[in-house]
Amino acid sequence: MKQFQLNTFVLAVGAILLLTGFVSAEDSSETKKPKQPQAEQTVLTIQDHAWDGGDELDIRVKLSPEVFDSVTGGQASGELTLLQSEEFRGVYKQISKLPPNDGSWELDAENHAVSIQIGDLNRETEYFYRVYWQPQDGEKQLLTENTVAISPERQWFSGEKWKLALVGIMICGSVILFIELAKRGWKLKVRRIAGLEAVDEAVGRATEMGRSVLFVPGIQDMNDIQTIAGLNILSHVARTAAEYDAKVEVPTSKALVMTAARDTLQGAFMAAGRPDAYNPDLAYYVTDEQFGYVAYVSGTMVREKPAACFYLGAFFAESLILAETGNSIGAIQIAGTAQPSQLPFFVAACDYTLIGEELFAASAYLSGSPEELGSLKGQDVGKIIVAVWLLAGCAIATLSVWGISLEMWY
């Protein structure tokens, strides 16, 4: 009996030891399994990029310290790869990797995170992303992926254009300010343009010689701002001619321009106190065809030999033909256009040339309208503000290159 109890005790102890050893073996096998904390500690965050046109996404990947150090350290021992697909678990293509960092990746060492901005996307398309990590001596591992599709969204305003918006606010604000000042009777000083100084001289010469004054308002219709500016100057020329009793002839290539020119002439003659001298036939229609119009005007210049020729408006290939013809008959010529390609011809062949914006400035100056004068003055002041801003930016950038920071002055 004692022997049986002893054997039973030995068997029980052996069973306990055996079970204990099995459990220990299992525990040890668990501890021997390789740990992969990088996958568990990786967090993928995908957000729409703010203030854009709906073509960018911001991707942030929070990594484990091990993975972060392996791809961002001085001696990189791993590689992080970002892939993109338009279908979940579909065909993924690589769009970026780290290292090397080409400047597109932002590193957050404190939180062990990397960020990148993905562009050239379609807001009508859904996107999926995967992040892989491959250690130096190991196989590539999938760290994280998004299972819910994301698409970029278009914003109301583009944050990348804030500088342009600031410039627009400066210029528009100065224009509105000076228009209001002009309406309240403030005298706005505007630089007088040399071409306008010669108007009286040219019309006076035509009066002395008993010849006419030819005014060509360009070949565009009334929907062109250059034509409107030219007709504003025509008002001043016609008023001066009415005071000097000189004949003004205005051939046009558009019927609507002819009607506007007649109204301008009539108003100018009335302002000069000579409404009876106005003749509607002074402004007439020739043809819409460009070179047919130029041929007629050139022939008129050769036959009648006007003492003064004005070319103010939109001109193209006909500019040199008209200017050379006027030069050949010895007329005083004053030209103005905002067509950059035609300005050299006018400068070479005419006595005075209103270059680019001077055409519009002359129109505003002669009109005396508070809206036009205020706009002119406001644009000039706005340009000065922007120029000062650009110079300050260039100075700051230059100082930063030399290693001088504005903080050193505080």
Image: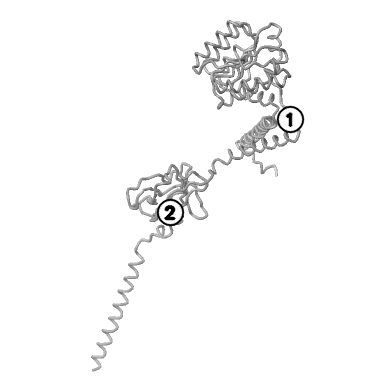
Q: Please tell me whether mark 2 sits on a helix, a strand or a loop.
A: helix
Q: Which residue is mark 1?
A: 188
Residue 198 visible to an observer of this rendering: no
* Type of amino acid at the residue the image marks with label 2: Val
Location of residue 407 in the rendering, given as x and y in whole percent from the top left corner:
66, 44
Q: Amino acid at mark 1?
A: Leu
Q: Residue furthest front?
A: 276
Q: Is 89 or 15 nearer to us in this picture?
A: 89
Q: Which residue is mark 2?
A: 67
Quadrant where the N terminus sits is bottom left
Mark 2 or 1: the one toward you: 1
Q: Is residue 130 left or right of residue 243?
A: left
Which structural element holds mark 1?
A: loop
In the shown orientation, is residue 270 left or right of residue 257?
A: right
Callout 2: few (<14), some (14-19), or many (20+) C-alpha neighbours within 10 Å? many
Q: Position of residue 328 (x, y in %)?
A: 59, 6
Residue sitting nearer the eye, 286 or 144? 286
How many tags in the picture?
2
x%, y% of residue 149?
40, 53
Q: Residue at x 31, y 75 (%)?
A: 21
Visible residue check, residue 271: yes
Which of marks 1 and 2 precedes in the sequence? Answer: 2
